[in-house]
Image: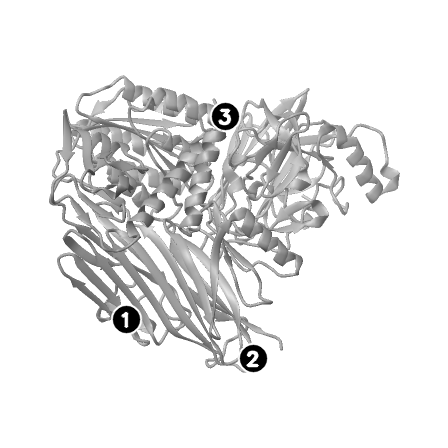
Amino acid sequence: MERSVVKLLCGLLLLFATGQPKTDDWDIYSFHINSTVTSRYATTIITSRVANRMNESKEIEFHVKIPKNAFISKFKMMMDGQVYEGVVKTKEQAQVQYTEAVSRGQSAGIVSSVGRTMEEFKTSVTVAAHKKVTFELTYEELLKRTHGKYKLQIHTRPTRPVQDFKMDVHIREKVDISFVDVKGGLNTKALANAITKTHTNKQAWVYFHPTVDQQKTCDSCGEEGMNGDLVIVYDVNRENGLGDIMTSDGYFVHHFAPSDLPRIPKNVVFIIDQSGSMHGRKMAQTRTALVHILNDLAEDDFFGLISFDSAINYWKRELIQATGQNLEQAKQFVLNIRDRGATDINAAVLEGARMLNVHPREGSASILILLTDGDPTTGVTNINTIRSNVKQKIAGKYPLYCLGFGFDVNFEFLKKMSLENNGVARRIYEDSDADLQLKGFYDEVATPLLTDVTMIYVGGANLTQTNFSQYYNGSEIVVAGEIIDNNVEIFTPQVVAISTRQKVAYSNTNSSVGSLDTKGLLQRVWAYLKVKQLLEKELLLTGSEKNNAKKEALELSLKYSFVTPLTSMVVTKPEGENTEVLYKPKERGNLQPERSTKAHGRVSNSGRPSVGHKSRKLGARIGSFPQSLPVGTLRKGARIASFPLTPQSQSLPVATPRKDISKVMAVQRMKTDSTLLTTSAPVFHRFLMKTVNYTLPLCFDVIGGVNLKLLHHPSTELYINGVFDSTTTNSGFKKIVIHVGADHHIEVDPEGISLRHGQSTTRHTGEDRITVGRFTVTRLSNETEFADVDVRLSILLHRKDGNNFLWPVLRQSPSAGDTVGLLALDQIQYEVVQQNSQAKVKITDTETDVQRSTAFDYRINSPTEVDCWLIAADFVIPMPLREIIVAQL
């Protein structure tokens, strides 16, 4: 019997049917969320019970959103008296099980995606006629204190009201709870009497039990039920400076957050990217946020402002006191920052560090804050060199905080650079509230209370991080570890730090240490912190140290059944059902199992971001062109294509290592037209690909002069195509054509611009600025700039061996998710697995031969020759032929 499919998402769970569901087809007859917070460690259990009311089987899908900071630790399905449990395994073990399932013709059913604060998990099972299934998911997280409060966020989005819907939160602390509030989109007037809040000294309860009618009538409700968050925020009283320390079963957890301290005056330098990619709303929001931040500086603070593109622009070359007059002048500087040029991150950060280094003040705290939205494109562009330069310049004296604006930035580079300089990296999402995100981050670090914090534990072992460069008002330091021989009598905690101009020490008191009666909980808190910190540490290490950190994190993940970036959960199901594997997703990635494609010896997969996760192409980053989609973002059915010799070719000739070019060329020509067989040297063009984790980029060759789709944005009727120069090897494009709607067409060639509107054509060969309707074209001596709504494209003019050619550089990506083309491709992640006479790289689980070579980087005004790994294009360009080639420009 053919099965209809019902999908169930309640944000927490989604339920819908392919086709229009009947009211009696299925029933979510119970949906419960139970979250217990014990000493700030939250364990949340989601239980959903579904009945199939039909006379035939249905596939029911369980879809859950959980906080990014959480680890899934348990999942099970109960059906017909049987329990099917998810098992946490190494990724390699999970991949073997998945591959075996694929070989039997089964498919992967899991897609994990990432939003701002939530990740998604889903699985499905076939439920027989008139039978029931129960899903139960458990996840764990340590609540982080920011802005003076802890926050527990629970999201719910059913597609229809649920009769028995309950959300119960129980908070238990060993110290008094100072306040409890309920916030979020579901805390509305219509749902007010569905929320019950009870608060005693050391416990609090929040119950959310909306009726079916209430689930239909609230502000974020409707016939499809609720859609929003419930957020519980609270804080605790702190009676002594040392904080509270819980002990149990030979483990301890120490929460340190003193508040009765004078603020430390700060020295802060803001380093602001004003390159071309910051055009439009990003630049405007940055200016707005900076003005608000300047308003919050205290008069005993000193500050500096640097904006940068390919050059550094100063307000002042030294730190200036935050007097009223100085702040007003600084605001004028901020309001006049304009986007332009390339991105020299190295020079800007080093200059910011210099300003702090030459202005030491006793009793103050220094902070360096970088905001950028792209990769380094000029000056020093090797990210490892930049990291080394910055680390040497800062020398551990103060933290560096990196804010990455949007998804066109190499966030892993920023994260590493921050971590190795005692800071953190934060992504700023391109949205209407980006200025509030910037201001919110600054508020977290605006009030330093302690510097050089050292946590000491006599009688403690196997500790998590114990040294912190600064402690800020409203935050918290958490340390966990083992108590040697479980001997609490000799266990002595102490904190030593610097406050303003003096050293302070907090010692153990009788009220500081208390026991916790929840067996095994503190051990899990310790493991949670340890894994998180080991994963950060592993990012910065190399060689055996890196392997040891990774091994320890993996062992702990397996021991405590945490789904982390190193492990996967294999969802076991009844015989004959699909095998599914849950991966912990990275930021902006869908790390799901991948199906091998025999024809190309290449691994691809079938996932795209789920609804609600904006699908934007990362490859637009400062014109990285072209780039490969990262692991886990290929569309279903995607096939590998090579580049064509002619638009009519059925397959595309690709150069792998240079020695094979003529061989490939001959084979492809014989396939298309035997009369084209020739021994003449082919014309090829070499492209550099941006990579996530290596400074040495990948490169590949494209043969022949072909028409390529560069950027197509159907929702705004913007189409950009280009044709290669077919006469000069290793050059670029001889013409780029831009179509805006049906009536406007711009042709750019090395000699000028032709603008056609209807039957009228005008030619522009000098420096000129042309504005027509919604778009503007600006022709400069060596560059043409095109701006249309939220798209900015630079077309650079280069000269080689007397031949002029063009190269497109996308400065700003379209915000809509329907963009395709070579300029819209994402970064690729690889690792070198062999570096001898025959080098190899591995992308996901597939290896291929590469050859060390060089390429010119035409994405910058003054091209430089860089080293690269020469690789087969069909190994890294996962795109159907129809999405690459256009018959005419």
Identified at 75% across, 45% down, the residue is: 651
Determine whether, in the image, residue 84 is placed left or right of residue 474.
Answer: right
Q: Position of residue 736 (x, y in %)?
A: 63, 37
Per the rendering, the mark at residue 689 is none
Query: Can the viewer see residue 877?
Result: yes
Relative to 696, 453 lies left or right: left
- Amino acid carrying label 1: it is His
Mark nearest the camera among 2 and 3 is 2
Task: Name which of mark 2 and mark 1 comes first in the sequence.
Answer: 2
Quarter of the rendering containing residue 706: top right
- The answer to whether 436 appears left or right of 138 in the picture is left
Give the CA separation, mark 2 to mark 3. 60 Å
Kindly indicate whether the residue at mark 1 contacts the one at mark 2 (C-beta within 8 angstroms): no
The residue indicated by pointer 2 is 56
How packed mark 1 is, by other alpha carbons closer than 10 Å (few <14, some 14-19, many 20 or more), is many
Number of marks: 3
Instruction: Identify the mark nearer the N-term, 2 or 3.
Output: 2
Residue bearing mark 3? 382
- Nearer the observer: mark 3 or 1; the answer is 1
- Identify which residue, 726 or 683, lies in the foreground: 683
Say whether disc 3 or disc 1 marks the residue closer to the N-terminus. Answer: 1
The residue pinned by badge 1 equals 209
- In the rendered view of the protein, which quadrant contains the C terminus? top right
Tell me where residue 653 appears, x and y as whole percent.
74, 39
- The three-letter amino acid code for the residue at tag 3 is Asn
Amino acid type of disc 2? Glu
Question: CA gap, disc 3 to disc 1?
Answer: 55 Å
Instruction: Return the x and y of residue 825 as percentages of the image width and height.
Output: 57, 43
Foreground pick, 694 / 751: 694
312, above or below 556, in the image = above
